[in-house]
Amino acid sequence: MSLLLRRFAPASHVRWGALTVAGSRHMSKVGEGTPDLMTGELTALPDINVSRLEITRNPKPATPPPSSSLVFGHTFTDHMLTIPWDLLSGWGAPRIQPYGPLALEPSSTVLHYAQTLFEGMKAYRQENGKVTLFRPDMNMKRMNNSARRIALPNFDGDALLELIKELVRIDKHWIPKEPGHSLYIRPTLIGTQKAIGVGPPNEALLFVICSPVGPYYPKGFKPVSLYGTTEYIRAAPGGTGAYKLGVNYAPGVMPQKDAAARGYGQNLWLHGPEHYLTEVGTMNLFVVFKKDNGAFELVTPPLDGMILPGVTRNSVISLARDHAAGKSRLANLPENLVVSERAVTMKEVQEASKSGRLVELFGAGTAVVISPVDRIGYLGEDVHIPTGEDGMGPVSRPLWTELVGRQTGTIPSDWSVTVTN
Ligand SMILES: *Cc1c(COP(=O)(O)O)cnc(C)c1O
C-alpha cells in the first residue's frame, strides 16, 4: 500500500478518485467516504473500528509521581492510543501501546503546514473509585469539525470515545484521587503525508495521550490580569479561530511573552476598531454587568467564527439559562439573571468599571474551569474589575460550584459519562 501511495504522490484528484474504488473492497463500516469521480457515489472506507483494537502492555510501567509534584501537562501515563489513516484503506487498526516517541519522516506535512488539531478533556476519579468523563461527545464533535476545516479525515466519534475509555481504564491508577485533580486527555490528529506539498494529506495519524494534573489554583483562586492586546489578533472573520487547530496557538506565544513583559498574565484578544472582546489567552470569556433594573447580565461573545466553542462555555451558559428560566435554580446565584450571547466592546467594559456596573469578568475552559480577572491593561490605563474575597464573584462562584460538582460526579447529571465503576 505505501509503495502505491509513494508512486502516485503527489497525485491529481482524478487519480485519487479512481484509487479509492479499490479501497472500498475493504469496507467494514460506512464512513464519510470519497465521491467516486466516475459514478459520483460515495465509496465507503473503513471507519474507526473498536473491535480491531490491539493492546500492547507497557513492559516497564512507571510509578505515578506524588500528586503534589505534578506540573500541568508534564507527566504522561504508561500508554497511548494510536490509529493510522490513509486515503486508500481508511482508518486502520487502533492500538493501545506504551507511551513513547512517534516515528515521522521529516517530510511529514504536519511539520511544514501545521496539519494538526487537538482536543482537551478530563477524566475524574471519585472517592469510591468511579471514573467519569464530562460531556465527551462534545469533544468528539468538535474534533471532527476541526478535522473538516483543515481537510484531515473525519471519523466515528462514538468509536473513538470507546477507545479513549479503554485507554483510561488501562491507566486509571494514574488518575490522582485528591480533590481537584484529574487526568487530562489530549486527542490529536496530524497529517503525515510524506511529501512536501500543500494539499489534503493521503496519510494521517490520530493519537491520544493522557497526563495526570492537579488543580489549576492549588492555593485557591488567584485572579489574573489581562493585557488588552491591540497589536496582534488571535482570530479573524472567516479564519480558523473557531477550531482547535495547532495553527491558532503558536502565533499567540510571542504576544503572551509581550503581555508578561508588561506585567500581565494573559492576552485579552480584541477584534476590530471597536475592540470587541473575544477570548482570554486560550479560554472563553464572560463578563457580568449590573443593569439599571438591578438585574445581573451574564454576557459572552457569540459564536461568530472567531470564538472557540468551548464545552465549559456551553455548560456555563446552559446552567445560567436554566437558572434564569426557573427550570433549575442554583443556590446563591442571583435570581434576577439575564444571559446574553452578544458582542461587548472595551468601551462598554471600561465605562461599566468607572460607573460601578461591572460585577466581574472571567475566563472559562477545561484546564482551569473558571479563571477570575482583576484588571485589564488597555491603551495605557488599567481597567479595574471587582473580585470577591476568594477571587470569585457572585455569579461565577455558584456556577463554578455546580459545574465542578457535575464534572466530578458529586452532583449527578447526564453530562457525566461513566468510564468504569
Ligand atoms: C480549548 C479552548 C477553549 C475552551 O474550550 P473547553 O472545551 O471549555 O476546554 C477556549 N478557547 C480556546 C482558544 C481554546 O483553545
Image (cartoon, rainbow, N blue to C red):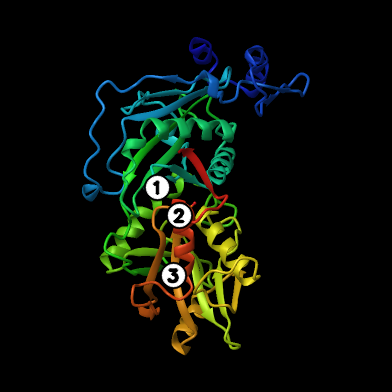
Q: CA distance from mark 1 to mark 3?
A: 22 Å
Q: Which mark is residue 410?
A: 2
Q: From this view, report whether residue 321 is shown above or below residue 181.
A: below
The structure residue drawn at horizontal position 53% and vertical position 77%, both measured from the top left corner, is 334
- Callout 1: SS: loop
Q: Position of residue 231 (x, y in %)?
A: 41, 65
The label on residue 126 is 1
The amino acid type found where label 1 is placed reads Gln
Amino acid of disc 2 = Thr
Which is more foreground, mark 1 or mark 3? 1
Q: Are marks 1 and 3 in contact (CB under 8 Å)?
A: no
Q: Residues within 10 Å of mark 1 (few under 14, many from 20)?
A: some
* Image position of 50 (left or right of 282): right
Residue 299's disc is none
Q: Compared to 226, does 1 lie above or below? A: above
* Of callouts 2 and 1, the N-terminal one: 1
Residue pictured at 31% horizontal, 45% vertical: 176
Give x and y (percent) for residue 126. Answer: 39, 47
For residue 301, what is the image quadrant? Answer: bottom right
Q: What is the x, y in percent for residue 381? A: 36, 80
Nearer to me, 115 or 225: 225
Towards the viewer: 117 or 179: 179
